[in-house]
Image: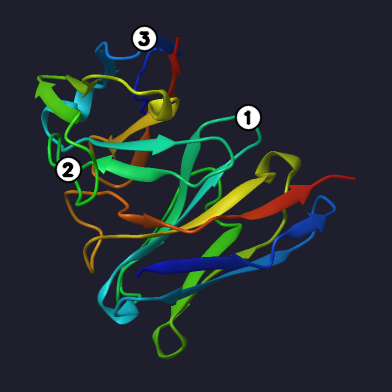
Amino acid sequence: EVKLAESGGGWVRPGRSLRLSCAASGFTFEDYAMHWVRQAPGKGLEWVSGISWNSGDIAYADSVKGRFTISRENAKNSLYLEMISLRPEDTALYYCAKDPQGTMVDPYFFDYWGQGALVTVSA
Amino acid sequence: SYELTQPPSVSVSPGQTARITCSGDALAKHYTHWYQQKPGQAPLLIIFNDRERPSGIPKRFSGSSSGTTVTLTISGVQAEDEGDYYCQSTDSTASHYVFGTGTKVTVL
């Protein structure tokens, strides 16, 4: 059974940093691309970032480019999201999501999701 | 920025058919996928590649595509189908993943 478990969420002041982690199990983690998708309270889904199986291809949404860094550690079956210069508009539930392929190519979608980690940015 | 447009809400009686549309200029060139999200839960993939169902998804969920509009159809709606539904694809440059605005399905 595929399981994705996010951790590292919490409350931070604007301008501060936070690092999210996602522990994967139930599949061969190193074979698949992975993503972060967020959902602000009461709002829709927004793709944040994706990384290919070998970290050779990385992409970001324009809204986080230059502030967020995605990475993975295949030996530990783990995905990370380093977030700096956080803004109130970054407040959201951050989901870790699995790609059905190893690279970010068409068709682009997410076949498994974690339960999310809540990040709150406020003064 | 590129957007996928969905109706905000759809209401349907049990046993009837619900149809949710998703429109976007690039949908004619790229596959569309659908997710169901119930309150307090993570999204669940219910349709991929316009019309394919993952294992375990009931047959009453189906997808179709015509040009720049794709449609999710729920035939014989059940009370458990209440929730938010999102379409998802990529933009014209295939550089970003894009979600639709979301549709709240209410079973009357």
Residue A64 in the image: above or below residue B9: below
Marks 3/2: CA–CA distance: 22 Å
Are the two marked residues, 3 and 2, in contact with CB atoms closer than 8 angstroms? no
Q: Residues within 10 Å of mark 3 (few under 14, many from 20)?
A: some
Residue B35 in the image: above or below residue B17: below
Residue underneath mark 3: B12
Q: Residues within 10 Å of mark 1 (few under 14, many from 20)?
A: few
Query: Residue A26's x, y, as percent?
Result: 35, 76
Q: Nearer the viewer, residue B59 or A8?
A: B59
Query: Residue B40's x, y, as percent?
Result: 59, 41
Q: Residue at x 79, y 60 (%)?
A: A16
In the rendered structure, the answer to whether residue A22 lies left or right of residue A121 reads: left
Q: Residue at x 38, y 28 (%)?
A: B81
N-term-proximal mark, 3 vs 2: 3
Marks 2/1: CA–CA distance: 27 Å
Residue underneath mark 2: B53
Q: Residues within 10 Å of mark 2 (few under 14, many from 20)?
A: some
Query: Residue A48's x, y, as percent?
Result: 48, 50
Callout 2: residue from which chain? B
Which secondary structure lies at badge 2?
A: loop
Residue underneath mark 1: A42
Q: Which amino acid type is shown beneath numbered disc 1?
A: Gly
Q: Nearer the viewer, residue B47 or B65?
A: B47
Which quadrant holds the C terminus of chain A? top right
| Occupied quadrant, residue B58 | top left
Q: Is residue B95 visible?
A: yes
